[in-house]
Image (spheres, grey):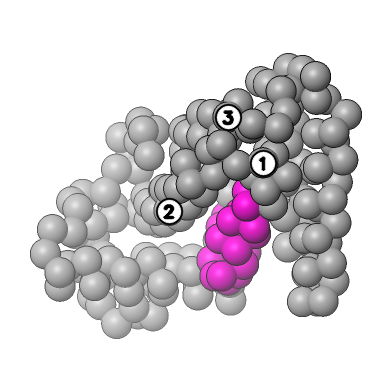
Amino acid sequence: MTASTPPALKPRKRPRQERARVTVDAIFEAAIQVLLSDGLPRLTTTRVAERAGVSVGTMYQYFPNKQALIYALSERYLEALAEKIEHTCRAHRGAPLARMVEALVDTYWRAKTERADVTRALYRSVVEMDNDSLVEAFAARVNIATTAMLASAPDAALENLESTNLTLVTVIFGTVRNAFERNLSPDKAEELRRQLVVMCNAYLDTVRI
């Protein structure tokens, strides 16, 4: 991400060697599990260290406090999500508009559901954390990728590309989050995904030139 990390939330150091990366991965995984089981108010660096099987001293080598840990976890998650969306958008430049929509919905849906526990944990933490800079950087990357993809559609020109792109992405992202908040069954979630594709294509049909 290109977000500027607040000084108080910067990691003390980045893992360079494989063993260090494995340690940080274990810390992140432990943080997710503590978030899910106990919530952000009860998450402490000590509890995360215990769950990860590392010492508190090892924790502090990387993260000065729990806010820095959750910020880094969110940064990693949004970086991976942005890369998946960018890859999909590049791969579908020049495709029919309906195929673009289906690919974008599928990519975002899969990314959010393949580790549903991570998504839920971060949704719970975001209301109590100042992640605005991360979200803004993520949104900027997505906007560039999706706008370029939509502009390349050979079978449609859009009335107002910038406004249409914003509406489309907002509908997709908002619907997926709502599905998580409702804790839908797999069958209902899949039906919602299909209907989301239908709705997005119907909207784009109304704004074609």
Marking on residue 32: none
Measured in 3D between alpha carbons, the distance from the residue under mark 3 to the one under mark 2, in whole angstroms, is: 24 Å
Q: Is residue 106 left or right of residue 64?
A: right
Residue 95 is inside the magenta segment? no
Residue 162: x and y in percent read 66, 20
Secondary structure at numbered mark 2: helix
Question: Hey, what amino acid is under mark 1?
Answer: Pro
| Quarter-of-image position of residue 52 | bottom left
Q: Residues within 10 Å of mark 1 (few under 14, many from 20)?
A: some
Q: Please report the bounds of the magenta region as a residue range.
A: 103-125
Q: Quickly name the residue at label 2.
A: 80
Q: Residues within 10 Å of mark 2 (few under 14, many from 20)?
A: some
Residue under the point 22% across and 66% down? 21
**First of labels 1, 3 by sequence position:** 1
Is residue 124 in view from this perspective?
no
Q: Is residue 68 left or right of residue 159?
A: left
Question: Hey, what amino acid is under mark 2?
Answer: Ala
Depth check: 152 or 61 in front?
Answer: 152
Residue under the point 84% across and 50% down? 198
Q: Quickly name the residue at label 3.
A: 152
Q: Are marks 1 and 3 in contact (CB under 8 Å)?
A: no
Secondary structure at numbered mark 1: loop
Is residue 171 in view from this perspective?
yes
Measured in 3D between alpha carbons, the distance from the residue under mark 1 to the one under mark 2, in whole angstroms, is: 26 Å
Measured in 3D between alpha carbons, the distance from the residue under mark 1 to the one under mark 3, in whole angstroms, is: 9 Å
Q: How many marks?
A: 3
Residue 147: x and y in percent read 58, 28
Q: Quickly name the residue at label 1.
A: 96
